Image (tube, grey):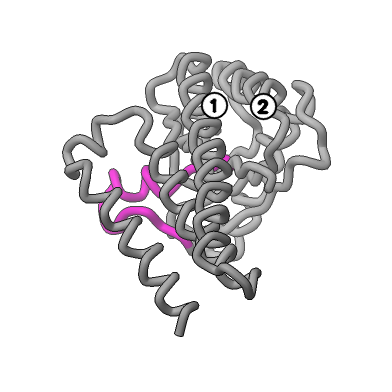
Amino acid sequence: MMMKSTIAVSMAGVLALSACVDSTTRIQDPNYRAQNGAVAGALIGGILGAGSVKNDKGRAALLGAALGAAAGGAIGANLDTQAADLRNRLGNPNVTVTNMGKYLLVNLPDDLLFATDSAAVQPGLQGEVRSIAANLVSYPASTIQVIGHTDNVGASAYNADLSVRRAISVRDILVGAGVPADRVSAFGQGETQPVASNLTSAGRSANRRVEIIITPKN
């Protein structure tokens, strides 16, 4: 019964904190990710603290919430800082960086990176990939996934193979620019994870991409 009450109190606290900031302010606030991480960390820490100590569970929950908030806030703040640094390094506005809360998503459109049916990164974009590598070297406490994606034009087996080869090409540039190989994995998803409709040329263009996912180490 006490455990349920503690969880309810933790949830109520999170809702109260969230209510203090309206949706418009959250979108415009550059520190929203850090704040969101702190709130989530507080909830998790509070529940863990309540469940781990039999005596004086309320005090343990508060201590756990404080520790969780500190950890969650630190992760969120680090992601905000790294994302800002990435954007400053990149010169092409079509290469985007999105803070997803738990990881950063860098989107590299295939139409910029590669010629049709080619897995060789075009010389003009290799500098952008090296700029990403410089950021990854500066922020070493993360793992990196490089994922290739295609549209649905052509045979699915060919698209799957092309997506793998393109992801490997980007990974090789990152590693060649100083990112330790054991931090980086590369694989392809072919046409299986579209982000737009393949019925239009604009949609197919959006689906042809290489994503770099940067996840902080716990």
Nearer-the-camera pick, 180 or 32: 32
Task: Name the spot of residue 47 as percent of width and height, x first.
Answer: 52, 66
Residue at 37%, 54% in the rendered image = 195
Against 105, residue 133 (above or below) is above
Q: CA distance from mark 1 to mark 2?
A: 7 Å
- Residue 110 visible? The answer is no
Task: Name the spot of residue 3 as percent of width and height, x first.
Answer: 49, 77
Against 192, residue 36 (above or below) is above
Q: Type of residue at label 2?
A: Tyr
Against 199, residue 1 (above or below) is below
| Left or right relative to 166: residue 9 | left
Residue at 60%, 24% in the rendered image = 132
- Residue 53 visible? The answer is yes
Q: Indicate the quadrant where residue 208 lies.
A: top left
What element does badge 2 sit on?
loop
**The N terminus, quarter of image:** bottom left
Against 209, residue 195 (above or below) is below
Residue reaching furthest to the bottom: 1
Magenta residues span 193-213
Task: Name the spot of residue 35 as percent of width and height, x first.
Answer: 39, 39
Nearer-the-camera pick, 205 or 103: 103
Nearer-the-camera pick, 14 or 173: 14
Q: Type of residue at label 1?
A: Gln
Q: Quickly name the residue at label 1.
A: 82
Disc 2 residue crowd, few under 14, some 14–19, many 20+, Cα 10 Å: some
The label on residue 3 is none
Residue 154 is inside the magenta segment: no
Cβ–Cβ under 8 Å for marks 1 and 2: yes
Residue at 60%, 38% in the rendered image = 118
Q: Quickly name the residue at label 2.
A: 139
What element does badge 1 sit on?
helix
